[in-house]
Image (tube, rainbow, N blue to C red):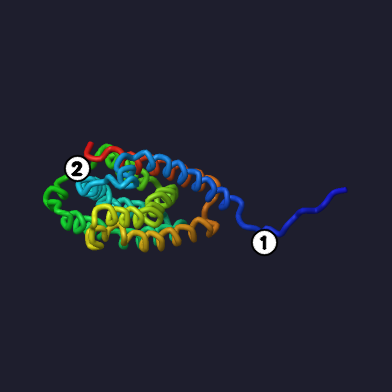
Amino acid sequence: MTTDTTTDSTDMPSTDTGTLFERLGEVWVELEEHLARVPLLQRLDDGTVTIDDYRRLLFNLRQQVVDGSPWISRAASNFDIEHFELRAAAIRHAEEEHRDFLMLERDYVAIGGSLADLRGGRKNIGSEALSGYMFHYADQPNPVGLLGAMFIIEGLGAKRAAGWAGRFQEVLGLAGSQVHFMQYHQEADSEHTGDLEAILTSGMIDDAAADEIVRCAQVVARLYALQLEELDH
Protein backbone atom coordinates (compact mmCIF):
# COMPACT_ATOMS: atom_id res chain seq x y z
CA MET A 1 0.00 0.00 0.00
CA THR A 2 1.35 3.40 -0.95
CA THR A 3 0.61 6.51 1.06
CA ASP A 4 0.53 9.80 -0.81
CA THR A 5 2.69 12.25 1.18
CA THR A 6 2.63 14.96 -1.46
CA THR A 7 2.16 18.42 0.05
CA ASP A 8 1.47 21.66 -1.76
CA SER A 9 4.86 23.43 -1.92
CA THR A 10 3.21 26.73 -1.02
CA ASP A 11 2.48 25.30 2.43
CA MET A 12 6.08 24.36 3.12
CA PRO A 13 9.09 26.48 4.08
CA SER A 14 11.89 26.64 1.54
CA THR A 15 14.14 23.60 1.97
CA ASP A 16 17.02 25.49 0.41
CA THR A 17 16.61 28.40 2.81
CA GLY A 18 16.38 26.09 5.80
CA THR A 19 19.52 24.34 4.69
CA LEU A 20 21.25 27.67 4.21
CA PHE A 21 20.45 28.78 7.76
CA GLU A 22 21.59 25.43 9.11
CA ARG A 23 24.87 25.74 7.23
CA LEU A 24 25.38 29.31 8.43
CA GLY A 25 24.61 28.14 11.94
CA GLU A 26 27.46 25.63 11.67
CA VAL A 27 29.80 28.42 10.56
CA TRP A 28 28.73 30.45 13.58
CA VAL A 29 29.54 27.57 15.93
CA GLU A 30 33.03 27.34 14.42
CA LEU A 31 33.45 31.10 14.90
CA GLU A 32 32.45 30.83 18.56
CA GLU A 33 35.07 28.09 19.01
CA HIS A 34 37.77 30.35 17.54
CA LEU A 35 36.67 33.33 19.66
CA ALA A 36 36.86 31.20 22.80
CA ARG A 37 40.58 30.76 22.13
CA VAL A 38 41.36 34.47 21.63
CA PRO A 39 43.61 35.49 24.57
CA LEU A 40 42.07 38.92 25.09
CA LEU A 41 38.55 37.51 25.14
CA GLN A 42 39.66 34.82 27.56
CA ARG A 43 40.96 37.54 29.89
CA LEU A 44 37.71 39.45 29.45
CA ASP A 45 35.76 36.34 30.43
CA ASP A 46 37.86 35.54 33.50
CA GLY A 47 38.01 39.14 34.72
CA THR A 48 41.75 39.76 34.25
CA VAL A 49 41.40 42.07 31.23
CA THR A 50 43.10 45.47 31.54
CA ILE A 51 42.41 48.96 30.24
CA ASP A 52 45.41 48.48 27.95
CA ASP A 53 43.73 45.37 26.52
CA TYR A 54 40.59 47.35 25.77
CA ARG A 55 42.61 50.20 24.25
CA ARG A 56 44.50 47.74 22.05
CA LEU A 57 41.25 46.13 20.94
CA LEU A 58 39.76 49.44 19.86
CA PHE A 59 43.01 50.45 18.14
CA ASN A 60 43.03 47.25 16.10
CA LEU A 61 39.31 47.23 15.32
CA ARG A 62 39.36 50.81 14.08
CA GLN A 63 41.79 50.03 11.26
CA GLN A 64 39.32 47.50 9.84
CA VAL A 65 36.06 49.26 10.73
CA VAL A 66 37.05 52.32 8.71
CA ASP A 67 36.99 50.11 5.58
CA GLY A 68 33.45 48.83 6.22
CA SER A 69 31.41 51.39 4.32
CA PRO A 70 33.84 51.54 1.35
CA TRP A 71 33.69 47.81 0.64
CA ILE A 72 29.90 47.79 1.00
CA SER A 73 29.68 50.71 -1.43
CA ARG A 74 31.96 48.92 -3.87
CA ALA A 75 29.79 45.82 -3.67
CA ALA A 76 26.69 47.94 -4.35
CA SER A 77 28.27 49.32 -7.51
CA ASN A 78 28.83 45.79 -8.84
CA PHE A 79 25.23 44.58 -8.55
CA ASP A 80 23.42 44.76 -11.88
CA ILE A 81 19.80 45.76 -12.37
CA GLU A 82 18.65 42.16 -11.99
CA HIS A 83 19.95 42.36 -8.42
CA PHE A 84 18.37 45.75 -7.75
CA GLU A 85 17.09 44.83 -4.28
CA LEU A 86 20.54 43.74 -3.15
CA ARG A 87 22.09 46.88 -4.61
CA ALA A 88 19.55 49.07 -2.81
CA ALA A 89 20.12 47.23 0.47
CA ALA A 90 23.91 47.61 0.13
CA ILE A 91 23.58 51.34 -0.53
CA ARG A 92 21.41 51.80 2.57
CA HIS A 93 23.80 49.74 4.64
CA ALA A 94 26.86 51.68 3.49
CA GLU A 95 25.17 54.97 4.39
CA GLU A 96 24.31 53.67 7.86
CA GLU A 97 27.84 52.37 8.50
CA HIS A 98 30.05 55.15 7.16
CA ARG A 99 30.31 57.06 10.46
CA ASP A 100 30.79 54.03 12.72
CA PHE A 101 34.54 54.48 13.00
CA LEU A 102 33.99 57.94 14.51
CA MET A 103 32.16 56.39 17.47
CA LEU A 104 35.05 54.01 17.98
CA GLU A 105 37.51 56.90 17.86
CA ARG A 106 35.57 58.77 20.55
CA ASP A 107 35.63 55.69 22.80
CA TYR A 108 39.38 55.35 22.25
CA VAL A 109 40.06 58.95 23.22
CA ALA A 110 37.69 58.62 26.22
CA ILE A 111 39.94 55.91 27.69
CA GLY A 112 43.09 57.96 27.26
CA GLY A 113 44.15 56.99 23.76
CA SER A 114 45.75 59.38 21.28
CA LEU A 115 43.57 60.17 18.26
CA ALA A 116 46.66 60.96 16.19
CA ASP A 117 48.20 57.59 17.05
CA LEU A 118 44.93 55.82 16.29
CA ARG A 119 44.52 57.44 12.90
CA GLY A 120 48.17 56.83 12.12
CA GLY A 121 47.92 53.12 12.94
CA ARG A 122 47.97 50.24 10.51
CA LYS A 123 45.99 47.05 10.20
CA ASN A 124 47.23 43.95 11.94
CA ILE A 125 47.81 40.72 10.01
CA GLY A 126 44.23 39.51 10.41
CA SER A 127 42.72 42.89 9.55
CA GLU A 128 44.88 43.12 6.42
CA ALA A 129 43.63 39.73 5.31
CA LEU A 130 40.00 40.53 6.17
CA SER A 131 39.88 43.90 4.42
CA GLY A 132 41.78 42.56 1.43
CA TYR A 133 39.30 39.71 1.05
CA MET A 134 36.30 41.99 1.42
CA PHE A 135 37.45 44.45 -1.24
CA HIS A 136 38.46 41.62 -3.58
CA TYR A 137 35.08 39.94 -3.24
CA ALA A 138 33.19 43.24 -3.53
CA ASP A 139 34.87 43.78 -6.91
CA GLN A 140 33.23 40.66 -8.36
CA PRO A 141 30.10 40.93 -10.52
CA ASN A 142 27.00 40.54 -8.36
CA PRO A 143 28.88 39.64 -5.15
CA VAL A 144 25.93 37.87 -3.50
CA GLY A 145 28.28 35.86 -1.30
CA LEU A 146 28.92 38.96 0.79
CA LEU A 147 25.62 38.25 2.50
CA GLY A 148 27.65 35.61 4.32
CA ALA A 149 30.12 38.26 5.45
CA MET A 150 27.23 40.34 6.76
CA PHE A 151 25.87 37.31 8.61
CA ILE A 152 29.16 37.09 10.52
CA ILE A 153 29.99 40.77 11.04
CA GLU A 154 26.48 41.96 11.84
CA GLY A 155 25.87 38.85 13.90
CA LEU A 156 28.87 39.66 16.08
CA GLY A 157 27.50 43.14 16.67
CA ALA A 158 24.02 41.88 17.48
CA LYS A 159 25.00 38.87 19.60
CA ARG A 160 28.36 39.66 21.18
CA ALA A 161 29.19 43.39 21.18
CA ALA A 162 26.87 44.45 24.00
CA GLY A 163 28.00 41.55 26.15
CA TRP A 164 31.62 42.51 25.61
CA ALA A 165 30.81 46.15 26.42
CA GLY A 166 29.02 45.19 29.62
CA ARG A 167 31.89 42.97 30.71
CA PHE A 168 34.47 45.69 30.04
CA GLN A 169 32.35 48.05 32.14
CA GLU A 170 32.00 45.52 34.93
CA VAL A 171 35.69 44.65 35.13
CA LEU A 172 37.22 48.06 34.37
CA GLY A 173 34.56 50.39 35.78
CA LEU A 174 34.03 52.12 32.45
CA ALA A 175 31.26 54.59 31.70
CA GLY A 176 28.76 54.12 28.92
CA SER A 177 30.49 56.89 26.97
CA GLN A 178 33.61 54.72 26.86
CA VAL A 179 31.94 51.66 25.34
CA HIS A 180 29.42 53.40 23.09
CA PHE A 181 30.66 51.78 19.87
CA MET A 182 29.95 48.28 21.12
CA GLN A 183 26.69 49.18 22.82
CA TYR A 184 25.37 50.91 19.71
CA HIS A 185 26.00 47.87 17.55
CA GLN A 186 23.72 45.60 19.54
CA GLU A 187 20.68 47.59 18.42
CA ALA A 188 21.91 48.65 14.99
CA ASP A 189 23.21 45.23 13.99
CA SER A 190 20.13 43.48 15.33
CA GLU A 191 18.15 45.55 12.83
CA HIS A 192 20.64 44.70 10.10
CA THR A 193 20.42 40.97 10.83
CA GLY A 194 16.65 41.25 10.53
CA ASP A 195 17.06 42.85 7.12
CA LEU A 196 19.50 40.10 6.15
CA GLU A 197 17.12 37.36 7.21
CA ALA A 198 14.42 38.93 5.06
CA ILE A 199 16.72 38.78 2.04
CA LEU A 200 17.79 35.20 2.71
CA THR A 201 14.16 34.08 2.96
CA SER A 202 12.91 36.16 0.01
CA GLY A 203 13.40 33.52 -2.68
CA MET A 204 16.24 35.45 -4.34
CA ILE A 205 18.86 32.95 -3.17
CA ASP A 206 19.38 29.88 -5.39
CA ASP A 207 21.63 26.92 -4.60
CA ALA A 208 24.71 28.44 -6.22
CA ALA A 209 24.25 31.71 -4.33
CA ALA A 210 23.74 29.78 -1.09
CA ASP A 211 27.06 28.02 -1.61
CA GLU A 212 28.79 31.37 -2.16
CA ILE A 213 27.16 32.86 0.94
CA VAL A 214 28.29 29.97 3.14
CA ARG A 215 31.83 30.00 1.74
CA CYS A 216 32.16 33.74 2.25
CA ALA A 217 30.84 33.38 5.80
CA GLN A 218 33.46 30.71 6.49
CA VAL A 219 36.31 32.87 5.24
CA VAL A 220 35.15 36.02 7.03
CA ALA A 221 34.54 34.17 10.30
CA ARG A 222 38.08 32.82 10.29
CA LEU A 223 39.65 36.15 9.30
CA TYR A 224 37.63 38.12 11.85
CA ALA A 225 38.83 35.84 14.62
CA LEU A 226 42.35 36.11 13.22
CA GLN A 227 42.37 39.88 13.59
CA LEU A 228 41.49 39.45 17.27
CA GLU A 229 44.23 36.86 17.66
CA GLU A 230 46.84 39.04 15.94
CA LEU A 231 46.42 42.28 17.91
CA ASP A 232 49.29 44.68 17.15
CA HIS A 233 51.05 42.24 14.79
Q: Quadrant of the C terminus?
A: top left
Badge 2 or badge 1: first in the primary sequence: 1
Q: Position of residue 179 (x, y in %)?
A: 26, 58
Counting from the top left corner in percent of width and height, residue 203 is at 55, 57
Q: Nearer the viewer, residue 147 or 175?
A: 175
Mark 1 Cα shell of 10 Å, populated few (<14), some (14-19), many (≥20): few
Residue 12 seen anywhere in this rendered image of the structure: yes
Report the residue at 39% width, 57% height from top. Answer: 158
- Three-letter code, disc 2: Arg
Residue found at the very far right of the displayed protein: 1
Q: Residue at x 41, y 61 (%)?
A: 190
What's the amino acid at mark 1? Asp
Q: Secondary structure beneath disc 1?
A: helix
Residue 166 point in image, percent of width and height: 32, 57
Report how far apart the C-alphas of labels 2 and 1 lie in the structure: 53 Å
Instruction: Give 104 or 82, whichever is nearer the viewer.
Output: 104
Q: Which mark is residue 11?
A: 1
Q: Secondary structure at mark 2?
A: loop
Please give the name of the residue rendered at 21% of the width and 58% of the height, measured from the top-left corner: 102
Query: Residue 139 in the image: x percent, y percent?
Result: 35, 46
Residue underneath mark 2: 122
Tell me the quarter of the picture where residue 108 sits: bottom left
The answer to whether the residue labelled 2 contacts the one labelled 1, judged by CB atoms less than 8 Å apart, is no
Determine whether, in the image, residue 133 is placed left or right of residue 83. left
